[in-house]
Amino acid sequence: MAKKAIVTDKAPAAVGPYSAAISANGSINVSGQLPVDPATGEFAGEDIKVQTRQSLTNIQNILEAAGASMADVVETTVLLSDINEFGAMNEVYAEFFAEPYPARAAFQVVALPKGAKVEIKAVARI
């Protein structure tokens, strides 16, 4: 199985021993994306909607670098620091996907890196 790391300057660079995404055998596995604006290296904002939009935009840009799109996403995992913000996150999430929607799991976690409100990972098939 051949693996290829997906790299783009339109999404934050990996800050550890991982790739932003790996493409292998028709699958693109996108690492969890924090709401970091790649132009500034900082969070796009403090609001859950702004952070969700940035995390999903990062995923979208990584997929485009791999020759895919959000329409190719078959599964996502959403990590929230506060499950009470699920509804607001979901409103923005719906802007990025169309039917048939990807499978999804959403969890509240104790904490996310850098105090983020959301982190989202995705799997796409091409």
Image (tube, grey):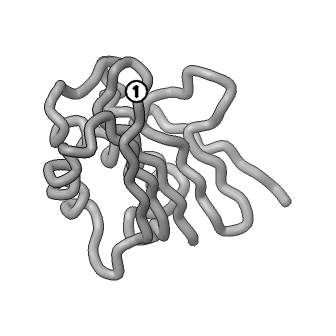
Residue 58 seen in the current view:
no
In the rendering, at what x and y percent does residue 121 appear? 47, 48
Residue occupying the point 25% across, 57% down: 93
Residue occupying the point 39% across, 33% down: 34
In the rendering, at what x and y percent does residue 43 appear? 28, 23
- The amino acid marked with disc number 1 is Ala
Q: Nearer the viewer, residue 111 or 28?
A: 111
Q: Is residue 49 above or below residue 3?
A: above
Say which quarter of the image contains residue 71.
bottom left
Q: Which residue lies furthest to the right in this view?
A: 1
Say which quarter of the image contains residue 20.
top right
Q: In this view, does 44 lie above or below 89?
A: above
Image quadrant occupied by the N terminus: bottom right
Image quadrant occupied by the C terminus: bottom right
Q: Is residue 61 above or below residue 45?
A: below
In screen coordinates, is 24 left or right of 75?
right
